[in-house]
Each structure stands twice: as C-alpha cells, then as structure tokens.
C-alpha cells in the first residue's frame, strides 16, 4: 500500500516528470509519480538531445545508454536543390571544457525508457492509470484528487509539494489558474519516421530550403530517418494527412531527388506548433515544469531538453528545502532562472521558424540576404551553436549568482579577454586533471557526479606555503561546517605534499586554471546542477560565509557552526 502522504507528488511521466522523480529519489526525497496512460508511449516525438542535456544525463549516470542507442549528429547541411547553402558544424564547439560537442538523435520513447530504468534502480515506479483531476492547497500541503482509471474510484493524496509535469494541456496549470499566453502558427507540419534507400551520411541532418516549404531529414537509430515538411494552410482547405505518397512527392519537388524511395514508416503524424509561456512557474506549493510551463516550435530541438533541465534545476532546491537545510525563498529562484530561459527559447525558435518557414517575400529576402550569409560565418555559427546546444544557458541575473572580486583584480583583468572566463551564473566548465595522491585520471564533471555543491579552491599557480596554508584552513572549515552539502576540492598547479586528505585535483597543464580564469588563488562554489554560484577572487572567507548564510537555513548552519566550535576547542 503506497502512502497517501508524500513529500512530493509528480503529475506526468514524460521526460520532465521522470527526470524530476529520479533527481528527488537520488536526494532521499519521497515522491510519487502519477501517469494517466496505461503504458509508455511508443512514438519517437522529440528526437534531439542537446549537448547540455547530455551533460545532465552524464551527471545522472545515464549518458552511456543514450550515446549507445542514439545517433551523434555532428552537422546540419542546408541545401537549395543540389547546392549546399550552408553547413552548421557542431565540432566548432569542441574544446576540453565541453564533454559532448554534438547533439544526439534518439527517439523520445527510448529516452523515456532510459529514465524509467534509472527510476527503477532508484526504487521508484510510475503509478499508471492515475489521473489527477483537481487539487486544493493548504498552508502546509497540497491535496490532489486522483482518479483510478482502472477501477473508476477516486482518492485524495496529500503532498508537501506538487509538480505539474503534465504536458502542454496541463490540468495542474488550469487547476491553479495560471494563464498560458501565446499563439499558434498557421503552418501545418507532416512528420514520418521512415527508411530511405539513399547513401547520404547518417550522422548529419539534411534540410532543403524551397519556396513552397522546407523538407528536413534527420537520422534516427537503425538507419531510420525522420522526415518533416511544412505545408501552408489554405483557409477552408484541410491539409492532407501525412502519407508515404505525399512525402515521396514532396521529396521530389523540394529536393529534386527523383531516385530515392521512402518506405517502411513506423510513425506518421500531422502537427501544428504553438508558442506559449505560463505566467508563473509557481503557485504556493505547486510548480510547473516542461511543456506544462512552455511550448514552442520544435525548430532547433529544444522542447524536451528545456523540460529536463527545468527538473534538474528544481529538484536539488526542493530537496534542500524539504530536508530543512534551505529556506523556502530558494524555491523562488526556480522561476527566476528558468522562465527567462524559456522566454529566450521561445524568442529564438520563433525567429528561426519565422525566417525559415514563412512564405512572405520580404522575410525570404531577409533570410537569403542577411541570415544565410551570417550562418556561413564560423564565429556566428559558434555563437548560434553555443545557444542551440544549451551550453550557453546562464543564470547570471539570479540572486544565487554572486561575484566577489577585489578592485585590483578587476583592474588586472580589464581588457584581458575577461569575457571568455566564466561569470557567476554560468555553466561550470569541465576539465581534465589527476586525482592525487593516486594520480588517477579524472574530470571535474566526474567529481560533480556527487550530487552536492562543490567548492573549487584554485591555488592560482601561486605555489607558496602561505597560500596552501590559507586554502587548506578554509577547506577544513567548510568540510566541518557543511560537509553533507558541499564537497571541497583543492585544485593545485603543482604536485607536492599537503596537509589535506580531502579531494586534491592536480591541474598539470594549468588548463583548468586557464578556463576558470584562476590566474590568482580563486574560489568557485559550483551548485549541484553544475552552475557557478559564487566566484571569489582572491580567496576570502567572508563572501563565502555571507553566501552560505543566504543559501542555507540558520538552524542548519548554526548547528554545524556549533560543532565546528566544539571540534576546535
Ligand atoms: C509530434 C511531436 C514532435 C516533437 N518533436 C520534438 C523535437 O523534435 N524536439 C523537441 O525538443 N521536442 C519535440 N516535441 C515536444 C516534446 O515531445 C515535448 O517537449 C516533451 O514531450 C515534453 O515533455 P514533458 O515531460 O514536459 O511533457 P509530456 O511528454 O507531454 O508528458 C506529460 C505526461 O503527463 C501525462 N498527464 C497529462 N495530464 C495528466 C493528469 N492529469 N494526470 C496524470 N498524468 C497526466 C501525459 O499522459 C504525459 O505522459 C515534439 C512533440 C510532438 C507531439
């Protein structure tokens, strides 16, 4: 018998709800995940997993099956007939701070199965044929009315918090009275997953730009392909349903290819696209995540990724609050950080959808005369891919992002390429190093798999006794103060014996120092979701203490400060 009272009730077992459940269970939070359908969906839907989602999956330890089952897409080619108009190359992103400089094409049902396997490993399960009909909120709990669709009975479930991951038609969003503002695009799209008897490379996306509409072909596992074509809606004339004959005809017309045959369709569909954003991500004890909060054009493959990352952002915050270690205000940073991301995804996908799908001659002139020449430029491509891969998402404006730099450092870094070093709120870069004393190869992201915050203390290539004494003293203090929630790493530029038996990372090539801009002793507090919370140059205790006091509950810190005091007596 499952408890009717639970810390968190998750509604909907799509990629967002599954990620949320896995991340909460990982942090010891009791949760139930309700799903109204009887069985997992078998259709491919969202096939694009972006580089940042791959990093998130690596952190959750499921990137290996994703890479093994998916197709790594490294290039997108756009053509006009036989001419290649431009190529977007993900390899432009490649450097040692990025683990996956590509996207992966994997049908959504397979991504969901990988998340489901993880859920089972963590002791969770989806409760199917349970539909949440309504909810009411009290000061300390949410009470959901749930229909058992198998038996026809209803029950009430009490939860401390409820998360609506119930998709674009979210009943949770409606139950809490939040508006879903936006519009629907006039074009209709045809979609089919098929076989093609052509010889084009299977790790690239191919898109034909044609005055009647686009024809996009994306690789799927097993030498299968996803076709998408848009059809202009004519008022009063229904758009024909997707069929092999229709797509074969569009392939011929829009690509000029008269020899390739389309066959063996496993899924076909017509769809329209919407652009909508909820007015607020939170109403008291109810949160919205994924498509329940935002929907947009699939152009650029951002939809499922944005939902997965919503969940990854909220889960650690909610866990800290439920464990009584952080105050409720931490939860407001979920909306503060994630709604602007959705706004920017909506704006970006809207721009590209308008430029590439509208038939308006002026827009087409803009596309051919301005946008396409820009897309041919490497620097522009790098910027575009940085955004599309979602590696460029940052929370610089969040109240959780704090930079402390003394005046002389600001003067020192002024005009010295300081824009390329990370800021508080940016994704923390990855880096290769050796774990001492074993000299075992590791990466920062491997270390970050421990699902707590990480304090990186860089020696700044200042290899003096005084510097190491200072860093080690601070490291000891933090380990005692908040050891369950912050893992401390000393990042050293020289191998030498130190009075520190905690994590010691040797940056032999100094490349991690370079990528973090740690040209003097520096402190980086990395949040559990891999973003830089606090950046402090040079290393100072007070900004860290101030930050922790804002972040953690006084009762949690006071207890540990007491134990620190006792341990030093
Ligand atoms: C044809 C198609 C193609 C797409 N292509 C792409 C693409 O290429 N790239 C991309 O990024 N995105 C794409 N998307 C969008 C992508 O599928 C969604 O962004 C993604 O599924 C959102 O995940 P989610 O978990 O937030 O919501 P969903 O996947 O919609 O999951 C919501 C779940 O909640 C359940 N549910 C709903 N109401 C209740 C209730 N009251 N009680 C219990 N359970 C409930 C539903 O049954 C469902 O399982 C596509 C979507 C479609 C339909």
Image: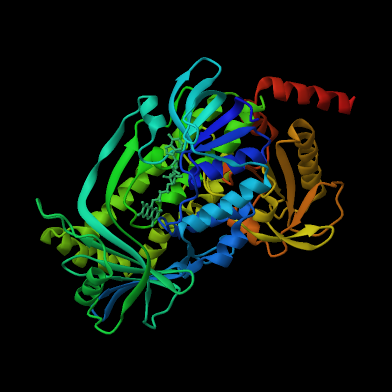
Furthest residue in direction left, as rendered: 236
Residue, x 51% and y 52% (percent of image)?
Answer: 418
Give the camera-side residue of 106 and 347: 106
Give the camera-side residue of 436 and 104: 104
Tally of marks: 0
Give the camera-side residue of 244 and 307: 244
Residue, x 16% and y 66% (percent of image)?
Answer: 212
Residue, x 63% and y 41% (percent of image)?
Answer: 124
Is residue 401 something that shows in the picture?
A: no
Quarter residue 463 falls in? bottom right
Residue, x 33% and y 38% (percent of image)?
Answer: 277
Is residue 9 something that shows in the picture?
A: yes
Q: Is residue 70 left or right of residue 470?
A: left
Quarter residue 451 falls in? top right
Q: Position of residue 332 (x, y in %)?
A: 49, 28
Q: Position of residue 506 (x, y in %)?
A: 75, 58
Furthest residue in direction front, as rendered: 151
Q: Is residue 347 above or below residue 154?
A: below
Q: Position of residue 512 (x, y in %)?
A: 64, 58
Q: Is residue 324 above or below residue 442?
A: above
Give the camera-side residue of 562 and 215: 215
The color scheme shown is rainbow
Placement of the N terminus among the 4 image quadrants: top right
Q: Is residue 213 above or below residue 2?
A: below
Q: Is residue 84 above or below residue 427?
A: below
Q: Is residue 325 left or right of residue 272?
A: right
Q: Is residue 129 left or right of residue 513?
A: left
Q: Position of residue 409 (x, y in %)?
A: 58, 45
Placement of the C terminus among the 4 image quadrants: top right
């Amino acid at each position: 018998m499952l408890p009717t009272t639970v810390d968190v009730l998750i509604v909907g077992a799509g990629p967002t709800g599954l990620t949320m459940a896995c991340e909460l269970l990982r942090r010891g939070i009791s949760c139930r995940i309700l799903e109204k359908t009887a069985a997992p969906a078998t259709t491919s839907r969202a096939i694009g997993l972006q580089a940042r989602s791959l990093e998130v999956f690596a952190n959750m330890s499921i990137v290996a099956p994703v890479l093994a089952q998916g197709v790594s897409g490294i290039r997108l080619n756009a053509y006009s007939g036989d001419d290649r108009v431009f190529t977007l190359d993900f390899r432009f992103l490649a450097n040692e701070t990025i683990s996956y400089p590509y996207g992966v094409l994997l049908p959504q049902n397979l991504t969901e199965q990988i998340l489901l396997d993880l859920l089972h490993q963590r002791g969770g399960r989806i409760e199917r044929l349970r539909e949440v009909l309504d909810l009411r909120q009290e000061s300390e709990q949410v009470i959901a009315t749930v229909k058992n669709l198998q038996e026809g009975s209803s029950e009430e479930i009490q939860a401390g918090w409820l998360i609506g991951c119930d998709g674009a038609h979210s009943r949770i969003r409606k139950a809490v009275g939040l508006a879903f503002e936006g519009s629907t695009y006039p074009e209709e799209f045809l979609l089919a997953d098929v076989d093609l008897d052509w010889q084009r490379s299977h790790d690239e996306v191919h898109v034909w730009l044609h005055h009647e509409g686009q024809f996009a072909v994306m690789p799927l596992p097993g030498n299968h392909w996803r076709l998408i074509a848009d059809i202009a809606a004519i008022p009063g004339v229904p758009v024909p349903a997707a069929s092999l004959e229709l797509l074969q005809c569009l392939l011929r017309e829009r690509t000029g290819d008269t020899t390739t045959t389309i066959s063996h369709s496993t899924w076909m569909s017509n769809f329209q696209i919407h652009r909508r954003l909820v007015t607020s991500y939170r109403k008291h004890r109810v949160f919205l995540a994924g498509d329940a909060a935002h929907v947009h054009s699939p152009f650029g493959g951002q939809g499922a990724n944005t939902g997965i990352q919503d969940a990854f952002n909220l889960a650690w915050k909610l866990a800290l609050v439920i464990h009584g270690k952080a105050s409720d205000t931490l939860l407001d940073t979920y909306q503060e950080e994630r709604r602007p991301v959705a706004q920017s995804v909506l704006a970006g996908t809207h721009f590209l959808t308008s430029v590439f799908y509208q038939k308006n001659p002026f827009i087409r002139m803009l596309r051919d005369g301005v946008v396409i020449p820009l897309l041919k430029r490497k620097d522009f491509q790098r910027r575009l891919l940085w955004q599309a891969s979602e590696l460029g998402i940052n929370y610089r404006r969040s109240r959780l992002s704090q930079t402390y730099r003394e005046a002389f450092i600001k003067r020192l870094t002024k005009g010295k390429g300081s824009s390329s070093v990370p800021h508080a709120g940016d994704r923390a870069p990855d880096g290769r190093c050796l774990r001492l004393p074993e000299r075992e190869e590791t990466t920062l992201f491997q270390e970050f798999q421990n699902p707590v915050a990480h304090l990186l203390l860089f020696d700044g290539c200042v290899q003096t006794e005084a510097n190491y004494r200072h860093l080690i003293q601070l490291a000891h203090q933090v380990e005692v103060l908040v050891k369950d929630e912050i893992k401390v790493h000393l990042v050293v530029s020289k191998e030498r014996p130190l009075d520190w038996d905690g994590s010691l990372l040797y940056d032999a090539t100094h490349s991690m120092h370079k990528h973090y801009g740690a040209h003097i002793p520096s402190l980086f507090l990395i949040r559990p979701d891999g973003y830089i919370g606090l950046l402090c140059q040079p290393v100072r205790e007070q900004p860290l203490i101030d930050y922790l006091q804002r972040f953690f509950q006084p009762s949690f810190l006071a207890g540990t400060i007491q134990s620190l005091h006792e341990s030093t007596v």
